[in-house]
Every structure is written in structure tokens, then in C-alpha cells.
Image (spheres, rainbow, N blue to C red):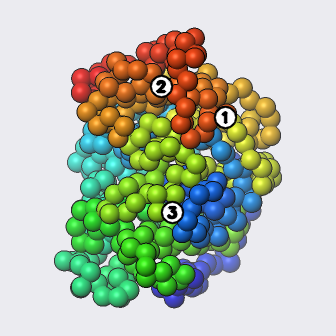
Amino acid sequence: MSGRILNVVVALLSLTRSSHVVAAVVRPNILFILADDLGYGDLGTYPNPNTTHGHILTPKLDELATQSMRFTDAYAGAPVCAPSRCTLMTGRHTGHCTVRSNGPILNASDVTVATVLQEAGYHTALVGKWGLGDNASVAAPNEKGFDYFYGYTSQENAHNYYPPFLWLDHQQNMIPQNKNASKESCGSPLTKNCVWAQDLFINKTMDLLEKFAATPDRPFYLFLSFTTPHAGAIGSDGETGVPAPEELQPYSQHQDWPEVERDFASVITLQDQQVGLVLEHLQKLKLEQNTVVFFASDNGAHNEGHHNYQFFESSGPLRGYKRSLHEGGIRSPLLVRWPNVAKAGTVSKQQWGFWDFLPTAAEIAGINRNSLPPRLDGYSMVPTLKGMTQAQPEYNYVEYCHPNEDKKGWGQTVRFGDWKAVRLTSGQGHIELYNLATDISETNDISSKQPEQVKMAAKYMDEAHVTGNYCNGH
């Protein structure tokens, strides 16, 4: 662990008072940790058989996997940030939700999982990246169910790893050290004179956990939304690299690697360390046994800021990357730790999408399904977490405005059973069809051999999409 992080932890742990050591609350707490642009193959516990530069070190998440149910067939809400977060918040897939591309914001009528849990008596907090509406809009985090917010409202601002301010609820919380931040002014390591936003997120998270532990009669929902390992910059909103505050061993010894790849690996390992700090703090505060922990990524591996997603084979065996409607763009790692409920160290092939989180969180919280917002697309996977057998969903659907397979058009993908279909060129093109049970890499389009399955895919795509002026008139 770096001295910078260790000092933060020692200072925070010293704040823990014996009065915070309390009995567990009846209703479980919920902690959802979301990485930004982390690939399916970037975690040590997921398959990455072809990497030539070795596996990125993620020991804390690997340890979490041994304590969790690990899902092999989980899906982010979309192949880019904002629509993926929209599905996570609202329980509706991209054929129905109001944010289907980067740029738009939630509507006044959108009900989020935070609102559902807040109305059920939960503390609700968001630390990190929001990206679904600024503080002057109806989609501000505090207007969408979060009692507490600290971080970025803007996706573009979140590219700046060393921002001059972060939002604290509706107020700008200035960071004087980051005024006019640059690689030169920040020094080496970059935290010598400047402040890495991720460190501030962990400080706030630790502080919030302290406060939650002091009110054991009230459960919490905490959404920790990292901005790493998304491409970013130092002191600007550009995407010029992946500026790690320091290059970690053993990556720094690989001087034959491009700097951006050493930084990329370092950022992921630093993020892993920070997840470990949060989990250790849960244990220290005796919150661990009554907290359900989710860990996922908002979409597939990125290929931006001069980083090459194939350097570490970040998509693992999957085809494509961020903005792709093939598996590499939308399949996400997913770990769920629920002590004494979800059997530790198990692997589940249950298909799950971000739109399933709202009903799952509601059932964890003991909220009746009839009390939830209407027209949800998701289902609760609590039975799976409890070791019961659940039927697979009829289908999982994702659409996106500019898939990188066809940047000029609009595209759709649907998975039903082990069949996976992709339709590009503004929804009017050829439907590709793959059998994921035998072709996880989507290399063999068998649509000509399976006309009935193609017909079924078209039916699902047509019924899942509600037309509106969301993307190129669709």
C-alpha cells in the first residue's frame, strides 16, 4: 500500500470511537461500487487467457470474489456511461429509459433506486460520478433521492482527475491545491502538490460510513461511483491519458511499455486498494455482516486517451470494447457479497442487467414490489443470491446511438437464452446471430442457419424499443 493511501487510512481509522461499535440493523445496508470503463478481463477472477503483458493486479477484488457470488453473465446498462447509469438508477433498459446516450438528463418524472430506498427510510449517499443531470436541473443528485452527494455532476468534468472543485450537494467545494493543475505543477508523484479526486472520494466514503455506524437503527444505501480507469487528464476535461497519481511496482519497471499502459495498470491497482480500504472500514465499524456489497463496471473496456484495450486484453475472450454492442462493450464483471445469505465463492450464470438492480435492492430492503415505480424492466435476483433456482429473463436488451461497429447508425442487441443478436445500420440492417454457449467471442454469425431465432430476435428488438427523439430520431 502506498504511503499516501496508508496515511489517509490511519487518520480516518483514528476517528473511530467505541460508541460506533454497534449491533447490526435489521434491514441490510447496500453498498454499490461502480468502476468506470473497467473491462471484463481486467479483474484477476475473470477469464483473460490471451494477455501477453500479464494480469493487472487486483488482490482486494480477488479476495472479495472469494467472499461473494461471482456472476459470469452480467450486463451493464449500455456500452457508454450515462445511459448505463440511467438503467442502474431507474430499473428500465435503454429501450425505455430517458437517457439513451451521453448528454441528455433524467426527467422530472424519473424515479430512482435512491428515491425508492430513501422513502423506505434509508440513508442515501452518492460519492463520485453522477453524469445524469447538473445541479441546476431537475436531475440533480439531491433531487433524485440522494440525501448526500459529493463528486462530479458532469461526465466531461469527471475526465479531470485533479479538478479545481467537486460538488458537495449543491455547493462547489473548492480544492485550492488543484487550481491550474498540470503535470508540472502537481509534481511527482502527482499528489505531491495536487489532490487526486479518487482519494477525496475515499475520504468522504470513510466519513459517511462513520456517520452511518453511529445511527444503527437506520440502514444506508451508498453508491460509490469511481471515475477510474476512464481516460482523463490533469487540470482539464480532455481525455489525453489515464493519469495515475503514481506508477506502481511492478508496472514502473516495464519501461518498454507505453507510459499510458503503465498508468492504466497502476490506476486499476490503486482503485483495487481503495476498494479494499472501504471493505476494511466496513469490518472495522462492524457493518460488514449486514451490508450487501455490489461491484461492477458501467460498460466495457475503453480504447481512449492513447490507451489500447488490447494491451492487457481488457475484454478477455469477448469481442469489442466500449461503445460496442457485442459482448465486450456491455458485459460487466459483477461481484455480490451478502454475508450468510449469498454463498461465498460461488459462480452464477444467472443473466442480470443493470435494470435489475432497483427491484433487487428493493427486495433486499423489504419493499413490496407493488410499491415500486410502474413499467420496470428488471427483476429481483434475490432468490439467486439465496441459492434458489430462477428462470432466466425472457431477454436482455440494449440499444445505443453510435455503436463503434457502425458509427453512422443506431444499433440494438438482444440476448435470449444463449442466443445473441446484433442489428446495426439504424435498426434496419442485417441481424447477426451468435450462440454464446459455443461462441463467446461472437466470431461465427449463424443467422443464415437459424431463421427462426433471427425472427425471434427481431420480435424482441421491435417490442423492447419505444420510439422517441432519443437518437437520430429513434
Image check: 275 left or right of 185?
right
- According to the image, label 1 marks what residue? 438
Q: Is residue 319 above or below residue 389?
A: below
> Residue 27 placed where, x, y %?
68, 48
Q: CA distance from mark 1 to mark 3?
A: 24 Å
Q: CA distance from mark 3 to mark 2?
A: 28 Å
The picture quadrant where one finds residue 183 is bottom left
- According to the image, label 3 marks what residue? 312
At 72% from the left and 26% from the top, the residue drawn is 391
**Is there any visible trace of residue 132 in the rendered image?**
yes
Q: Secondary structure at mark 1?
A: loop
Q: Secondary structure at mark 2?
A: strand
- Considering the image in quadrants, where does the N terminus appear? bottom right
Q: Amino acid at mark 3?
A: Phe
Of mark 1 and mark 3, the one earlier in the sequence is 3
At 64% from the left and 26% from the top, the residue drawn is 417
Q: Secondary structure at mark 3?
A: loop
